Image: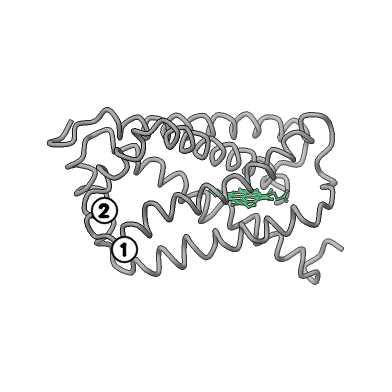
């Protein structure tokens, strides 16, 4: 039953909406924010980390607008994967492939996000020295090629998941009804995904090449 009276329909719509805003919007902001690593430790630690840490209502923003919507999207996403119900919208070789990519990237992302939050936000709360020099902390971590590799994979899983998710969300919400509109918007989403991936990769490399003192 696909109606507003069906609780699964409403939860599914909520899952879709939260994946776009605020979670998808936050991902785009987060990648841009990290690309500022390129301008060096001083700029990053003061102009980015300290400035954001000083925002009013920060706990509400972090918990209410990021953590809870992401937790709902992730756990309902696991329930969708577990239910294994084939999606009537997704037919054909490419669609089927993207359908699985969305699920595999979701699970990989969940593991990556848990690791990333533990080694940045939680570590920073437990040790103020880490929070005070997040740039140095990330630079030390990313200097290990294994950690860099895990971050690179996590980043590209995230942008693939978001860009394919935007294309399927547009179908779910009836914004792209015809096959031609879906194809056109698919290209737009692919372009956006590539752009975000390049911004994110630039940010990861920025931690390694930018100066640890002064502003680049
Ligand atoms: C950076 C974090 C994430 C973002 C930005 C994001 C975004 C999105 C978007 C926009 C959609 C499309 C919704 C639709 O088709 O209507 C989606 C779908 C999906 N997401 Fe996520 N997501 C994230 C993390 C996760 C995690 C951690 C999981 C955990 C498994 C997950 C599981 C899923 C699943 C299974 C779908 C497909 C739902 C379907 O086919 O109906 N996502 N995501």
Residue denoted by label 1 = 126
Furthest residue toward left: 214
In screen coordinates, is 63 left or right of 140?
Answer: right
Q: Indicate whether 9 appears above or below 160.
A: below
Q: Indicate whether 108 appears above or below 57.
A: above
Give percent across and percent down for residue 5: 80, 72
**Disc marking residue 59:** none
Give percent across and percent down for residue 100: 74, 39
Residue for point 66% across, 40% down: 167
Residues under numbered marks 1 and 2 in contact, where contact means CB atoms less than 8 Å apart: yes
Label 2 neighbour load within 10 Å: few <14, some 14-19, many 20+? some
Q: Quadrant of the C terminus?
A: top left
Q: Secondary structure at mark 1?
A: helix
Q: Indicate whether 3 appears above or below 26.
A: below
The residue at label 1 has a CB less than 8 Å from ligand 1: no
Q: Indicate whether 20 appears above or below 34.
A: below
The answer to which image quadrant residue 33 occupies is top left
The residue at label 2 has a CB less than 8 Å from ligand 1: no
In screen coordinates, is 103 left or right of 157?
Answer: right
In screen coordinates, is 127 left or right of 179?
Answer: left
Label 1 neighbour load within 10 Å: few <14, some 14-19, many 20+? few
The answer to which image quadrant residue 74 occupies is bottom right
Q: Nearer the viewer, residue 184 or 96?
A: 96
Give percent across and percent down for residue 21: 53, 55
Q: Secondary structure at mark 2?
A: helix
Residue denoted by label 2 = 130
Give percent across and percent down for residue 60: 40, 69
Q: Quadrant of the N terminus?
A: bottom right
The answer to which image quadrant residue 125 occupies is bottom left
Residue for point 83% across, 61% down: 2
Residue for point 84% across, 37% down: 91
Give the tally of numbered discs.
Answer: 2
């Amino acid at each position: 039953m696909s109606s507003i009276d069906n609780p699964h329909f409403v939860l599914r719509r909520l899952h879709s909406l939260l994946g776009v805003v605020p979670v998808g919007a936050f991902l785009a902001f987060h990648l841009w924010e990290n690309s500022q690593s390129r301008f060096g430790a001083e700029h990053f630690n003061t102009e980015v980390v300290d400035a954001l840490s000083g925002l009013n209502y920060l706990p509400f923003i972090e918990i209410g607008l990021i953590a809870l919507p992401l937790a709902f999207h992730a756990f309902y996403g696991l329930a969708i994967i577990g239910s294994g119900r084939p999606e009537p919208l997704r037919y054909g070789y490419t669609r089927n492939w993207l359908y699985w990519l969305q699920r595999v990237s979701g699970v990989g992302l969940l593991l990556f996000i848990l690791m990333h939050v533990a080694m940045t936000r939680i570590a920073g709360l437990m040790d103020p020295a880490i929070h005070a020099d997040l740039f140095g902390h990330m630079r030390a971590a990313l200097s290990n090629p294994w950690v860099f590799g895990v971050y690179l994979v996590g980043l590209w899983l995230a942008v693939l998941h978001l860009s394919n998710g935007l294309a399927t969300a547009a179908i779910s919400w009836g914004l792209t009804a015809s096959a031609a509109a879906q194809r056109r918007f698919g290209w737009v989403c692919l372009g956006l995904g590539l752009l975000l991936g390049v911004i994110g990769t630039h940010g990861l490399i920025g931690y390694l090449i930018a100066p640890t003192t002064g502003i680049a």
